[in-house]
């Protein structure tokens, strides 16, 4: 098919998308919209009669007033898409439920992303990508994601309640929807792949979770990409042998308990059930995505343009900050961005002038805990996630400015100011301190070695003191300084673990560590003491204590893990105090290293450290510049105390800098 035909096809699809986005506005319906009042009887009877746009055009107050909240009701059938399905009132707040449908969301998100890829290809030159390998990859990728629906039927019975998941014909329908979406999205991705590598910071804006599904739309791209790479180069098939051997270890440990987990804000990055089918699906998904991203970066590394990438980081950060402000105030945009941009959670509605006033007029001489209320995640699923992104932007910009002498203007400085404000209100202290340290590093390199080391030690000590004092203030009942001795901090994790455990029903982790303390196992006491003291200083003692209260691994789990993106067993096998029988106290561990331990065991941690060592060794040999290395190091350090690895934007960023540094490519 020629270029003109595809351009026309895309225009038709874009028109179709815009029509659907009008949410089936009932121009020809004689039934008029009733003004929203305290009497809700009309809307409780007349469900799915009025589109959201029609409703809000006649009730303008619902678009911006805080006590009108739009809920995305993604269980609806297609006929109710974009229409008012219910309105409820709780005290003074009105909750307006709007019908959405997972399959329409899948198609719309795919078409929107395809259009973005299309307009990014400014030359409009289309490659010859439609070949046998393309269609084999298309069918295999569609089949894999259809299998993913089968593996998590408990989750999808709620989301696709209008479909009978016991019928084979249902899965044929699901397969065809995936086939359509994967075809379009990968056709336009492959035609623009070289240009797109410089746009990857926008992944933090287009988060990609398909509303109603437990998958991310970018999985459809990178899994397809890796399958196609294997078909092009048969030597890459060897990775499947390693993968399937590891899968055998994981499924050999699966019992028939079917532990279930509501993924909440990590939807699209976590299995919902612990069974053999789900373990197989998420293992393939994780490794194929991982290898697909690395392969994509390697294949397009020559297209990286530092100046362009720097602008993308800065523009993406500014847009993210502004989107957080705008979507927090307008209910319609809040709901639309949640569906079309694939947010894990809707934008917080706390960003306003009062928020900024209270934050930047806080009396810091009082309790440090007062500033905790100024933390906001804005458009992002977590404050740590967005804080790390803002930090990378500032470091990357400064390094380009220092080493490459990039030109800046008044608009760039305005954008930098917004990014800096975003970093401050994320209240990610580790990110703030590391930004300051990494921006000082080029100047430290100019000092004599002894002076540089001394200066660095002073900074680290100051950093620990600041964090320590902040924690002392945080833990004090009366907002006064309270010094905790080393015995307290070194046993913080174990004591928190015991506090959260039921007597006589402790996890194997608690039993082992308690036994080590009772038997004076000095090695275990020393290692745990170091980790516990570190956790105390960074305010992770309680969370990591709750983790060991839950962590109940078998010997195979401890060595090999339970499989990637599999948290169901950890959060269900051992009940802890305060845990609900239905959902559980779903507090994440706030450490990507702990996640890797859960997924891949100690073998996974050893492989990770070895890969990091090899990358450092190769980088030192070729002496690459710091522009690509320091952002990578910044992200690695932050991931020690954050769960941002759950989000594909962070995963891609980490793998991007890792691949560039390991390739020793000088840009």
Image: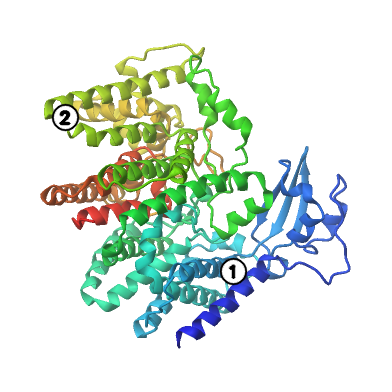
Percent position (x, y) of residue 348? 59, 42
The quarter of the picture where the C terminus appears is bottom left
- Residue at numbered disc 1: 103
* Disc 2, SS: loop
Q: CA distance from mark 1 to mark 2?
A: 59 Å
- Indicate left or right for 147 with 329 as reference: left
- Which residue of the protein is positioned furthest toward the left in this rendering? 621
User: Which quadrant is home to the N terminus?
Assistant: bottom left
Image: 104 above or below 422 = below
The residue where tag 2 is placed is: 447
Q: Residue sitting at 64 percent across and 60 percent down?
A: 74
Q: Are marks 1 and 2 in contact (CB under 8 Å)?
A: no
In terms of depth relative to the viewer, which is nearer, 571 or 422? 422
| Nearest to viewer (mark 1 / mark 2) | 2
Q: Position of residue 435 (x, y in %)?
A: 34, 36
Q: Along the line of sight, which residue is nearer the eye, 541 or 389?
A: 389
Residue at 53% across / 64% down in the picture? 153
Specify whether residue 562 is in view: no
Residue drawn at 35 percent across, 39 percent down:
638
Q: Nearer the viewer, residue 198 or 461?
A: 198
The answer to whether residue 200 is above or below residue 136 is above
Q: Position of residue 477 (x, y in %)?
A: 50, 14
Of label 1 and label 2, which has the lower sequence position? 1
């Amino acid at each position: 098919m020629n270029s003109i035909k595809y351009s026309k096809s895309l225009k038709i699809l874009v028109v179709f998308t815009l029509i659907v986005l009008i949410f089936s506005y009932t121009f020809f319906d004689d039934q008029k919209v009733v003004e929203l009042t305290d009497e809700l009887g009309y809307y409780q009877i007349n469900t799915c009669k009025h589109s959201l746009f029609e409703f809000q055009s006649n009730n303008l107050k619902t678009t911006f007033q805080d006590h009108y909240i739009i809920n995305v009701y993604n269980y609806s059938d297609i006929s109710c898409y974009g229409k008012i399905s219910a309105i409820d009132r709780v005290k003074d707040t009105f909750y307006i439920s709007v019908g959405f449908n997972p399959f329409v969301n899948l198609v719309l998100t795919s078409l929107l992303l395809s259009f973005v890829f299309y307009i990014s290809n400014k030359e409009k030159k289309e490659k010859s990508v439609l070949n046998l390998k393309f269609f084999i990859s298309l069918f295999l990728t569609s089949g894999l994601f259809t299998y993913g629906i089968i593996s998590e039927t408990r989750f999808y019975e709620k989301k696709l309640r209008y479909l009978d998941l016991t019928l084979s014909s249902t899965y044929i329908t699901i397969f065809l929807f995936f086939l359509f979406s994967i075809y379009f999205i990968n056709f336009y991705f492959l035609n623009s792949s070289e240009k797109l590598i410089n746009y990857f910071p926008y992944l933090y804006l287009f988060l990609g979770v398909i509303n109603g599904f437990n998958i991310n739309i970018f999985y459809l791209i990178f899994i397809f990409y890796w399958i196609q790479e294997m078909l092009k180069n048969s030597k890459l098939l060897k990775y499947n042998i390693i993968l399937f051997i590891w899968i055998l270890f994981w499924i050999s440990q699966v019992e028939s308990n079917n532990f279930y987990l509501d993924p909440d804000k990590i939807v699209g990055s976590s299995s919902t059930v612990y069974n053999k089918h789900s373990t197989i699906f998420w293992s393939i998904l994780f490794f194929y995505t991982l290898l697909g991203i690395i392969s994509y970066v390697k294949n397009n590394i020559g297209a990286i343009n530092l100046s362009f990438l720097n602008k993308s980081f800065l523009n993406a950060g500014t847009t993210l900050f502004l989107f957080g402000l705008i979507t927090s105030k307008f209910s319609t945009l809040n709901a639309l961005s949640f569906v079309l941009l694939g947010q894990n959670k809707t934008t917080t509605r706390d960003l306003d002038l009062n928020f900024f006033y209270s934050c930047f007029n806080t009396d810091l001489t009082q309790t440090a805990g007062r500033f905790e209320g100024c933390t906001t995640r804005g458009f992002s699923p977590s404050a740590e996630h967005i804080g790390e992104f803002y930090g990378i932007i500032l470091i990357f910009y400064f390094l380009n400015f220092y080493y490459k002498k990039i030109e800046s203007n008044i608009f760039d400085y305005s954008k930098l100011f917004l990014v800096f404000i975003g970093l401050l209100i994320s209240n990610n202290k580790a990110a703030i301190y590391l930004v300051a340290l990494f921006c000082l590093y080029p100047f430290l390199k100019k000092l004599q070695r002894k002076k540089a080391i001394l200066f660095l030690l002073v900074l680290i000590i100051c950093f620990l003191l600041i964090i320590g004092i902040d924690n002392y203030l945080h833990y004090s009942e009366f907002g006064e300084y309270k010094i905790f001795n080393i015995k307290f901090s070194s046993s913080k994790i174990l004591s928190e673990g015991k506090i959260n455990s039921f007597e006589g029903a402790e996890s194997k982790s608690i039993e082992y560590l308690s036994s080590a303390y009772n038997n004076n196992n000095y090695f275990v006491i020393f290692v745990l003491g170091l980790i516990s003291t570190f956790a105390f200083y960074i305010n992770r003692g309680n969370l990591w204590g709750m983790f060991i209260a839950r962590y109940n691994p078998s010997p195979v789990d401890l060595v090999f893990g339970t499989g990637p993106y599999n948290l169901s067993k950890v959060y269900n096998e051992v009940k802890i105090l305060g845990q609900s029988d239905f959902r559980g106290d779903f507090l994440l561990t706030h450490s990507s290293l702990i996640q890797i331990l859960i997924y891949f065991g100690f073998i996974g941690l050893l492989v990770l450290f070895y890969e990091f060592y090899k990358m450092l060794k190769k980088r030192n040999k070729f002496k690459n510049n710091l522009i690509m290395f320091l952002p990578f190091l910044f992200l690695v350090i932050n991931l020690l105390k954050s769960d941002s690895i759950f989000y594909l934007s962070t995963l891609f960023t980490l793998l991007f800098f890792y691949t560039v540094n390991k390739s020793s490519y000088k840009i």
